[in-house]
Amino acid sequence: MEEREAIAKLKETTDYRYSHYAYVNDTGKAFDMAIKALEKQGLEKRKSEKSMRIETKKLIEEHPTVYDVDKAVSELQDKSFERYGNQGMGGELVVNFDDAVEIVKRGGVDER
């Protein structure tokens, strides 16, 4: 049973009790206090989860990436050469597959 289900069940019980009996002892007060405490705990838990998601997102966004897209593209362009396939056609730029794989593996970052 989840917290929200427990709260709903307690509220049903107190609604039934109020409609059939007088509010004569501390049991009713205990139910009310339990409901309020569970509702408060649920609210705090949701706030905590939201705050954790925000902090995680912020950490990811602020963390520098080791993959330098611009440098990887630049290196691919540097390694490219013009290849002519058909007579009368202009050449197209190609990159040796092994060179491309190495550049992408490093993410454009220089080896140390």
Image (cartoon, helix red, strand yellow):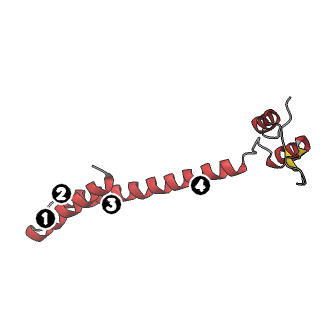
What residue is pinned by disc 1? 17
Query: Residue 104's x, y, as percent?
Result: 77, 39
Could you classify mark 3 by the number of other residues whose Cα lies within 10 Å: few (under 14), some (14-19), or many (20 or more)? few
What residue is pinned by disc 3? 36
Q: Is residue 61 above or below residue 17?
A: above
What residue is pinned by disc 4? 54
Q: Secondary structure at mark 2?
A: helix
Q: Hey, what amino acid is under mark 1?
A: Arg
Closer-to-camera residue (71/82):
82
Could you classify mark 1 by the number of other residues whose Cα lies within 10 Å: few (under 14), some (14-19), or many (20 or more)? few
Closer-to-camera residue (71/39):
71
Quadrant where the image shows the C terminus? top right
Q: CA distance from mark 4 to mark 1?
A: 42 Å
Residues at marks 3 and 2 touching, judged by CB atoms closer than 8 Å: no
Could you classify mark 2 by the number of other residues whose Cα lies within 10 Å: few (under 14), some (14-19), or many (20 or more)? few
Q: Residue furthest top?
A: 112
Could you classify mark 4 by the number of other residues whose Cα lies within 10 Å: few (under 14), some (14-19), or many (20 or more)? few
Q: CA distance from mark 3 to mark 2?
A: 14 Å
Q: CA distance from mark 1 to mark 3?
A: 17 Å
Q: CA distance from mark 4 to mark 2?
A: 41 Å
What residue is pinned by disc 2? 27
Question: Which of labels 4 and 1 is toward the front?
Answer: 4
Upstream in sequence: badge 4 or badge 2: 2
